Amino acid sequence: MDTLTQALSIITADVGATVTHATLIERVEGTYRLLARAEAATTLSGAERDVTIGLWRAITEMERTVQRRLVNESGPLMPENAAGEGVDLLVATCSAAPPLRAVIVGLTDRLSVQSARRACAASPVRLERTVSLGTRFHHWEEETLAELYRNPPEVLILVGGADASPTAPLESAAGVLTTLYERLPGEQRPVVVFAGNLEARREISSVMAPVMDLRVVDNVRPGIHVESLGELERELGLLYEQHALPRVPGFDRLSEWASAPVRPTAEALGTTLRFIARRVPGGQGALAIDVGGMTTHAAAARDRGYQWATCADTGTSYGLEGVLERAGVEGLARWLPRRLGGEEIAATLRNAALRPHSVAGSRDELLLLHAALREALAAAMGLLRQQHWGRLDGDLTTPPFDLIAARGGVVAHTPNLSLVALSLLDAIQPVGLCRMVVDWAAVWPALGVLAGLEPLAAVQVLENDAFRDLGTVIAPRGGDEPGAPALQVAMVRDSGRLTEIEVAAGSIVRLPLEKGEEATLEVRPSRYFDIGLGRWGVGGRATVQGGGLGIVIDARGRPLTLPTDAREARRAMIEWLRSLEGHADGTA
Amino acid sequence: MPTGRPERQLVRMATILRRRVLEPPAEVLVSAGAEVAPEHIVAQARREGDIHVVDVAAGLKVGQREARRYVVVQEGQWLAAGTILAQRRVFLEDPREVWAPVGGTIEALRGGLLFLRADPYLVRRRAHLAGRVEEVLEERGVVIRSVGRLLAGAWGAGGEARGPLRLCVRSADAPLGPECLAPEALGRGARGAIALGGVLEDASVLAAARAAGLAGLVVSSLLPRIAEAVATAGFPVLSVEGFGHIPWAGAVFEALAGDVGRQASLSATNADPAYGPELVIAVEEEEAGAAGEGQEDLVGAAVRLTRAPHAGEVGRVIGLPERVVLAETDLPGPAAEVRLEDGTRVVVPWVNLVVLA
């Protein structure tokens, strides 16, 4: 449709690996508002192997809510007609395709290969293998080549050499790989992305391009101390869009329904997140985490910078196997307030992965899913810290952000906000003062697409409807003996009402402050805590906003240390959850 | 919560359409409408042999560029396994030699590596199900239409098998130990059979199954800790309920017990990627015709609850209330009222139910 004419009604769709979400946005008295949302199982298998079937169901669910027709048997009614049936636009994002299987081939184990690994961690690829040819002899192992031939990756990333270094080893590697794959049927040959020595481009193109789909991007390591990942990351993102998404059953039809190209969910989420970060110039930016069914994604936007990391096969439905593998049952059990046997944990999570559309039916099961959520999220945050923030393995804290924005099925569908907040705090371990919000309607990525068609709609929905506010969090760095005074907190509401509390080290408490309310908060830490100002024992004052939980004061310390004794750890989890479910000022 | 009808575990008479294809180009050997047996080959393709890479430079202990000098075979040459590929004479030492690990054709020498392609081979796709060719997919294979008992599994590993169905436990909740698969317990004719057992708790059962020559194993559930052993057992294993200690639902077990001796096709990993693990039991056309399609009405159906707090329990649907909002997830969705075997009534979302039979 002509986008110069303002759309009156818009459907957004986010087709995930497990669930398809839809929302209806309409212009109401001059302002775009989110009127309805619904979800349906993503239809990827069996006789219903077409994602538009699931989307169609989600839209018909919304019809029940708004009591008007939006679709007919063949798809959405577009544009909206005089009788008010149908919508003017449909925008869609998709993350239902599994990540691309990738292999890195490099000359050495370090430098270029490490840089390429970092690029993969930020991309929708599953890195299956890294092949290093050795520094002196550039030696191929026979079994490695046989394996590369038997199970060709979808993407082969060839890296190595600083710009202007000798090109012969790379040319030799290109020749070997070309020989290996030239007799495979075309569709089975991997796409080659060359991100190595600039000088080798011409020769590598002449050897590989006649046989393989070759993409040439900037050298990831043009100099020993210089790294350039942007182009490789962009190319891998593009390959996911070009090769993986179109393989999703029904993707062609989804593209026909959509008013703009269907974009990968993570990429569209990046657009929205960058917009949010830019709204607060000079601020501390926004951190977004997306714990999906199959993949977990963490992204940080600050000023004009944007960094992200993706954990493939790590999520809260299909990805539960991956979480179990990473964390083990012990890693998951430490987050549970009740003792569960290892077999029970493994069986429950593996059965949940086998039936990804089923939902948690008990508190114990929900707590176990939140344990998995913490581990999935901690893994993605770990990648973000290591790959982009240069943190060491053991540093589990997150620097201050103005906003922490969380999304994903388990995050959005847990009515107990205290549990959601606790899981996020445990896994992210933010330091300082931040606001925490949840994408309750699964609409943020689609708003990134909508911004290109109807920017006003995207902005107004983002401001009015897209956030479920959990509240403001204060989490100091440092620690002290449990029970020792950690923080003196004074909160003055707009009404002038003063609340003063002392928060003990090792505890987490909250002060009520309704959504839409503001207050002035003054925090004075003991000398063992830093509230994010970079100075121990120095206090500060800030204007804070309320939310579902009000103000959360997390004085458990950073990095967060769980009691080593399992019984003590369970007791601590119960206490922290209870404490967040009540109020520090005695109100319930 | 996501909408959708509950899955059915056992459809007593189902019309089953499954794709049986190979990577193109393949030769389709049957035509539309043809009757096929499970062992019938419906498509075949000639495939290039695997590439074997021989590191000549390393074998002769010379540099990559130097290696070419010592190669005694030519590109395009066919040779048998064990043929000398390269040879280097070293003063006062035995000559260093590199041999062909397999028979095949020399493709190329690059970077000190010899690429040896094994001889071409034929890959075949069998019908796997008894039925009729519904559709020919050009250069790929066919769609088979079959009528039979369809048991949907939750998890499986190890590919496909075909054989007569055999029972190796006496009741729905009887344990499956290695003694159940001992020759004296199984009796004659167990070799090549697909056996039905209970909960798989012990990896030693796999060794017993292998020793008995079973073609495949169908269990009610298995413990997570032996999943890896199952995946590498070398024969297909299907778990109907998934993981944990979940015995057969009585109705399903009884229905399958009545099929002992019938030919079954087990897909622990389904060659048709659109479908999950399953067991198809051949039934006579007349019987299928009499039975018709499976029961569609949910009320009265025997169901298994898949999630806590009643995970694994069995009951019967006694009503379909209005949509419920599940307290733990805050999501509205269709639900069923179920009377459990102990008489307890619970309301369960459809997505947490499996219709048994």
Image (cartoon, coloured by chain):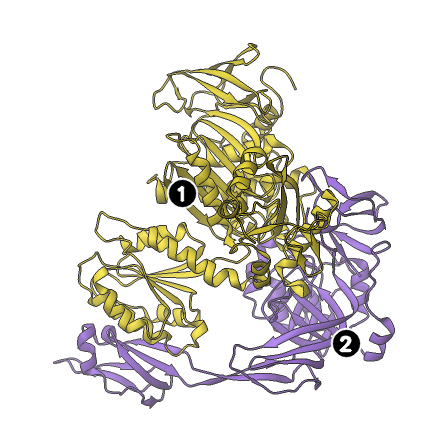
Chain colours: A yellow, B purple
In this view, the residue farthest toward the left is B91
* Percent x, y of residue A435: 50, 29
Mark 1 or 2: in front is 1
Q: CB atoms at circles 1 and 2 under 8 Å apart?
A: no
Is there any visible trace of residue B128 in the rendered image? no
Q: Is residue B7 left or right of residue B100?
A: right
Say which mark, if any, is on residue A507: none
Quadrant housing residue A9: top right
Which kind of residue does numbered mark 1 sit on? Leu
Q: Is residue A269 visible?
A: yes
What residue sits right under mark 2 in the picture? Answer: B261
- Amino acid type indicated by mark 2: Gly
Q: Chain of mark 1?
A: A
Relative to B275, residue A122 above or below: above
Q: Which residue is mark 1?
A: A384
Secondary structure under the numbered disc 1 in the rendered image? helix
The subunit letter for the residue under badge 2 reads B
Position in image of residue B193 (x %, y %) = 69, 75
- Residue A128 screen position, x and y as percent: 42, 60
**Viewer-closest of A369 and A298:** A298
Q: Is residue B91 left or right of residue A388?
A: left
In the displayed structure, B149 sits above or below B154; it is below
In the foreground, A269 or A527: A269
Q: Quadrant of the C terminus of chain B?
A: bottom right
Q: Secondary structure at mark 2?
A: loop
Figure quadrant of residue A397? top left
Residue in the image at 52% along x and 51% along y: A322
Question: Do tags 1 and 2 sit on the same chain?
Answer: no
- Would you say B284 lies left or right of A101 here? right
In this view of the protein, which residue sits in the foreground, B259 or A365?
A365
Residue drawn 35% across and 70% down? A145
